Amino acid sequence: MCYDKQKSSVLLEGVIHLNRLKHSSFIGILLVTIGATLWGVSGTVAQYLFHTKGINTEWLVTVRLLFSGLLLLLFGYLKEGKSVYRIWRTKKDAISLILFSILGMLAVQYTYFAAIEHGNAATATVLQYTAPVMITCFLIVRYRKLPSGIEITAVFVAVLGTFSLVTQGNINSLSISPLALFWGLLSAVSLAFYTLHPHKLLANWGSVIVVGWGMFVGGVVFSFIHTPWDFRGEASLTTILAILFIILFGTLVAFVFYLESLKYIGATKASILANFEPLSAALLAVLWLNVPFGVMEWIGTFCILGTVGLLSMVKKEKP
């Protein structure tokens, strides 16, 4: 009888633990899905501001970086206290942070918005998602190792997807402007640097502090190119609400939700589910802004997004 009670107790504990895991997994999936969707929607809202309201790209980049950076640092201060300032006390970390702020954060924000301005949010976001393939190619060359079959397949699928996206299958013509293609691929290069460079900073200081300072410093630097008070475009309630959405929901809320999701489902699952960003950008651009997106563009989109899933299957080597 005692044995039966112990067995029942163990089974009950197992069921409770399993339910907790399912609940945690659901929360993580929900958080990353919302965060990635907000990122995608903010790109489409930016396209609306550029093409409909005549907002200057450089001004929006400056304002987004400054205010989003300040809000993230405030969030970090509430969690970490005065430790948010300690990153500047080490010369090596300070130099690394400045490089990340300019060549990573500022570069990826400006090139992405420039790709939207000269094209559309859907194409710009999908092109930016070729970054994982660029990172894979860089690491293969950097560590002089032969690529695996999965990595070769991912590169091939990404090239095929990019070709389908920008040419609609016709090698003699581009379906987007050369500038949109240039800025879109440059945003992928910037995102690759943004991903690879700050790993030591992130390990030492955490993502909220590093990204918060990265945004703020990038915004301060870009203020010398376009000041935040030099507003150009249509000033209206709709414009203000769209800008606030990009800063608050498309940056702060999206970033915090993505970070929180990592606690529940881990980086691999989160990176795959982050594919909701280009999908939401594409769908909203088509449904709201009437961006033409044919069969070949969708094939190209799913090819590029498929590379994220392929690369997540590559076994990680021990450092």
Image (cartoon, rainbow, N blue to C red):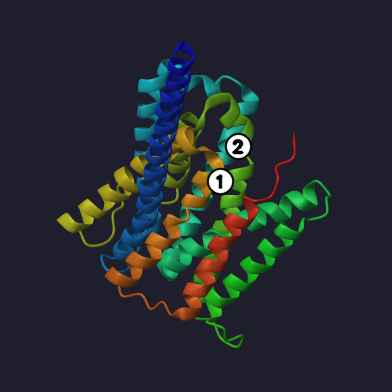
What residue sits right under mark 1 in the picture?
104
Q: Which residue in the protein does label 2 denote?
A: 198
In the rendered image, the quadrant that contains the N terminus is: top left
For label 1, the SS is helix
As rendered, which of 222 and 37 lies closer to the eye? Answer: 37
Above-or-below relation of 191 to 214: below
User: Which residue appears farthest toward the top when viewing the image?
Assistant: 2
> x, y percentage for residue 303?
56, 68
Residue 291: x, y in percent? 36, 75
Query: Split into 4 quadrants, where in the image is the C terminus?
Result: top right
Measured as percent of width and height from the top left, residue 41 is found at: 34, 57
- Tell me the SS state at disc 2: loop
**Label 2 to label 1, Cα distance in Å?**
9 Å
Q: Nearer the viewer, mark 2 or mark 1?
A: 2
Q: Residue at x 38, y 46 (%)?
A: 35
Circle number at residue 290: none
- Say what amino acid the circle numbered 2 marks: Pro
Amino acid bearing label 1: Gly
**Residue 134, picture quadrant:** bottom right
Contact check, label 2 and label 1, Cβ < 8 Å:
yes
Q: Is residue 262 visible?
A: yes
Q: Residue furthest left?
A: 237
Q: Is residue 176 visible?
A: no
Of 12 and 181, nearer the camera is: 12
Please provide percent x and percent y for residue 4.
Answer: 46, 18
